[in-house]
Image (tube, rainbow, N blue to C red):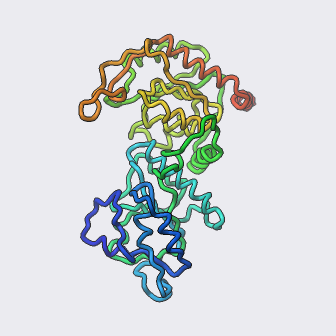
């Protein structure tokens, strides 16, 4: 039972708040281990813990639903989610990944992988995101927010409070990656779940060329200043099929996933768009052109996904446009643009392409595709 009467008069801009519920505004008729709960509630944080909500939990003497204590009763299984930044693919996929992991945590329940459920976002902002289609892998129903229940007592017959996007020692954002750890089964399964659920196709090939995709940034910073020259040289390589793409709001997200999923070598500067690497085929390589002095973020993600990862190492073969104009005027490698030595760029791409060509799963896929095309 969740009592949302305290939301009356608080407006529609509640996000990352730790006072959505007050004392006795969450509870139920259940076996309640109060001491154990309080021991687990030492850390309070909007995106790292459900502690701010559950410290208010109270065992009710009556059964809320049968005793008429509820203004609204929700019969379908409901996942209540706190979201990270929905405008950024890396951060929003912290949400989707942990929601997927939570399905497995809850896997003893027969409704676990049903998509006929509800998802309630723990804020009063109406949910929207360029990546919203990803929710279709988890539910067939509209996404709710707290405005739906403002001023009411809502009772849920089956509710899950999923793993959180920024948990300490959590999954994805704060994953404590052990040296040498790679090819996480959970990350692989998440990738396949999204690709399968959203019906993203893997195209049949008509030749054995390595498909190289360069993700071009339409942003102020971290652009490749000599990108056109690099692309011209890449196109000249006979064994490559080269595409330069821009993943912005003009390209539907499912179309972006389709282009990514049919890529063998994925190239991009440090940035949230590299999160697409999660949905590359298993044989693919990732070339983070320059990590902008943030060496672990996407190398770790590629390692967990089980992909070959390459990045620029010779700083003598790149030119930084200026010192970088970070927050507060401080210089920072993420807040400028770069030119790269073309020969070195092509050398690193070829390392990725050679890895792909040697993979048995790539060879088998090409052989099967060409055989099918000949039929």
Position of residue 253 measured from the top left corner of the image (x, y, whole percent): 46, 43
Q: What is the x, y in percent for residue 162?
A: 51, 60
Placement of 239 over or under 108, stated as above or below: above
171 in relation to 332, above or below: below
Side of 329 where 154 appears, left or right = right
Residue closer to the observer: 14 or 238: 14
Looking at the image, residue 274 lies above or below residue 7: above
Q: Is residue 263 left or right of residue 156?
A: right
Q: Which of the 4 quarters of the picture holds residue 109?
A: bottom right
| Residue at (57% x, 28% y) in the render | 309
Q: Is residue 265 above or below residue 281?
A: above
Left or right position of 304 against 2: right
Furthest residue toward top: 343
Q: Position of residue 215 (x, y in %)?
A: 46, 29
Please identify the quadrant where the N terminus is shown. Answer: bottom left
Q: Residue at x 44, y 69 (%)?
A: 54
Q: Front-most of 201 and 156?
A: 156
């Amino acid at each position: 039972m969740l009592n949302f009467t305290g939301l009356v008069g608080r407006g529609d801009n509640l996000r990352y708040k730790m006072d959505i519920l007050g004392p006795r505004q969450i509870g139920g008729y259940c076996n309640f281990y109060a001491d154990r709960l309080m021991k687990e509630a030492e850390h309070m944080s909007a995106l790292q813990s459900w502690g701010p909500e559950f410290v208010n939990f109270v065992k009710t003497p009556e059964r809320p639903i049968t005793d008429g204590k509820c203004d609204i009763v929700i019969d379908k299984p409901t996942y209540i989610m706190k979201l990270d930044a929905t405008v950024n693919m890396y951060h929003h996929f912290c949400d989707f990944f942990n929601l997927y992991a939570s399905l497995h945590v809850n896997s003893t329940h027969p409704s676990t992988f049903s998509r006929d459920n509800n998802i309630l976002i723990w804020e009063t902002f109406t949910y929207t995101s360029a990546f919203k289609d990803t929710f279709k892998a988890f539910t067939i129903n509209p996404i709710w927010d707290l405005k739906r229940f403002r001023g009411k007592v809502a009772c849920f017959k089956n509710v899950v409070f999923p793993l959180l996007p920024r948990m300490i020692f959590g999954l994805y954002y704060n994953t404590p990656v052990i040296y040498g750890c790679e090819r996480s089964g959970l990350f692989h399964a998440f990738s396949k779940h999204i690709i399968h659920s959203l019906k993203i196709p893997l195209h049949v090939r008509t030749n054995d060329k390595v498909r190289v995709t360069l993700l071009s940034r339409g942003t102020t910073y971290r652009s490749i200043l000599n990108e056109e020259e690099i692309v011209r040289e890449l196109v000249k390589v006979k064994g490559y099929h080269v595409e330069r793409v821009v993943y912005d709001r003009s390209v539907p997200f499912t179309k972006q996933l389709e282009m990514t999923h049919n890529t063998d070598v994925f190239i991009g500067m440090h940035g949230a768009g590299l999160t697409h690497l999660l949905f590359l085929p298993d044989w693919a390589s990732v070339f983070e052109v320059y990590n902008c002095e943030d060496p672990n973020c996407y190398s770790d993600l590629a390692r967990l996904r089980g992909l070959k990862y390459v990045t620029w190492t010779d700083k003598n073969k790149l030119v930084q446009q200026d010192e970088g104009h970070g927050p507060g005027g401080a210089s920072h490698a993420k807040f400028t643009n770069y030119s790269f030595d073309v020969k070195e760029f092509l050398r690193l791409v070829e390392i990725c392409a050679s890895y792909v060509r040697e993979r048995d799963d790539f060879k088998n896929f090409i052989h099967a595709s060409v055989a099918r095309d000949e039929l």
